[in-house]
Image (cartoon, helix red, strand yellow):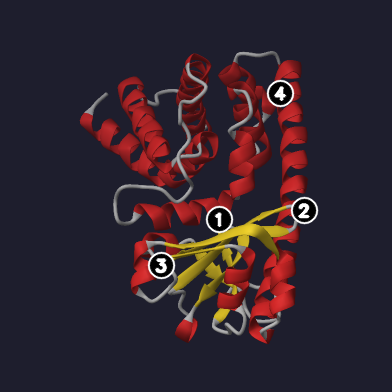
């Protein structure tokens, strides 16, 4: 490939990079792996050249999808070797300073529940579903990527679609239940209703605070329904919030979250409340406007 051809292809690739990164992220569920997959795809593209390619965007998407399928298959093989292997990263994880915010923004676009269920799909199912249902790639192009017949490829996507829809429905039900309990807890705390708080708390409930929250004055640890109800009765500073899309609360003077209240709820009872003020964690918090479900 001549230098000017290489430069032209590099420019076109950069134009498509945001889309390719989005495809890779939804296929892999990790921004770091997605970036690596896109870079791997560029190395393949730069070696092969684009001579004779009529649909450059579709061709690049196919290459990225093949790279991701290989990674998913390797991931599945590692899981078979060790069921304890941790191959999927937390949505808001990341080592560099900007990673948590970047992960949170991508998670908002994809949905935490969808990422979880996609991680349960077989590699070919995941590729067929994401490419067709999320990015509208024709089945005729997907068949070449997954190495199946058109009918088998449609079946892969259909099976994945049913699992995703079932998981999303169950997740939405869980989110509604969580929101109901959190709302009742906050109302009881504001009203100083000790008995109502007791009714919402598991007998062995525990409240924990991270180091940053403890330095701000939060209780390091409180155990037992009575002790927790006594501490929260009359507390008025917390407001509703979404944490990774799940109902929680936050102390937010001036409209900025300073301490997040993450609730763990089982069978309608609060079993744990984690108070967190670490800046990276707070980037995952979205405040909810009073008397609404709208994020502010």
- Does the rendering let one see residue 179? yes
Say if mark 4 contacts mark 1, CB within 8 Å.
no
Residue 277, labelled with which disc?
Answer: 3
Q: Residues within 10 Å of mark 1 (few under 14, many from 20)?
A: few
x and y percentages locating residue 230 in the rendered image: 59, 76
Residue placed at 46% from the left, 86% from the top? 254
Residue placed at 67% from the left, 67% from the top? 182
Q: Give the distance between the C-alpha atoms of the residues marked 4 and 1, in whole angstroms.
A: 26 Å
Q: Which residue is mark 4?
A: 156
Q: Which residue is mark 1?
A: 108
Q: Is residue 124 above or below residue 4?
A: above
Query: For residue 46, which quarter of the picture?
Result: top left
Q: Give the distance between the C-alpha atoms of the residues marked 3 and 1, in whole angstroms.
A: 21 Å
First of labels 3, 1 by sequence position = 1
Q: Determine the secondary structure under disc 2.
A: helix
Q: Which residue is mark 2?
A: 173
Q: Is residue 181 above or below residue 104?
A: below
Q: Give the distance between the C-alpha atoms of the residues marked 2 and 3, in whole angstroms.
A: 28 Å
């Amino acid at each position: 490939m001549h230098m000017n051809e290489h430069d032209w292809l590099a420019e076109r690739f950069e134009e498509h990079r945001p889309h390719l990164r989005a495809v890779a992220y939804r296929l892999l569920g990790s921004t770091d792996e997605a970036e690596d997959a896109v870079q791997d795809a560029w190395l393949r593209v730069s070696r092969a050249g684009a001579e004779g390619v009529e649909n450059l965007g579709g061709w690049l998407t196919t290459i990225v999808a093949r790279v991701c399928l290989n990674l998913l298959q390797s991931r599945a093989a590692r899981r078979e070797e060790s069921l304890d292997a941790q191959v999927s990263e937390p949505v808001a994880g990341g080592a560099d300073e900007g990673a948590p915010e970047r992960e949170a923004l991508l998670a908002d676009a994809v949905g935490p529940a969808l990422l979880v269920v996609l991680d349960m799909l077989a590699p070919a199912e995941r590729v067929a579903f994401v490419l067709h249902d999320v990015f509208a790639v024709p089945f005729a192009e997907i068949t070449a990527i997954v190495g199946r017949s058109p009918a088998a490829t449609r079946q892969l996507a259909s099976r994945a679609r049913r699992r995703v829809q079932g998981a999303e429905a169950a997740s939405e039900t869980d989110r509604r239940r969580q929101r109901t309990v959190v709302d009742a807890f906050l109302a009881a705390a504001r009203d100083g209703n000790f008995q109502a708080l007791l009714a919402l708390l598991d007998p062995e409930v525990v409240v924990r605070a991270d180091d940053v929250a403890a330095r701000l004055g939060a209780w390091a640890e409180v155990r037992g329904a009575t002790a927790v109800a006594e501490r929260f009765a009359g507390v008025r500073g917390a407001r509703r919030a979404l944490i990774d899309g799940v109902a929680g609360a936050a102390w937010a003077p001036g409209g900025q979250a300073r301490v997040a209240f993450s609730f763990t709820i089982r069978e309608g009872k609060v079993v744990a409340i984690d108070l967190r003020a670490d800046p990276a964690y707070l980037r995952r918090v979205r405040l909810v406007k009073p008397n609404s479900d709208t994020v502010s």
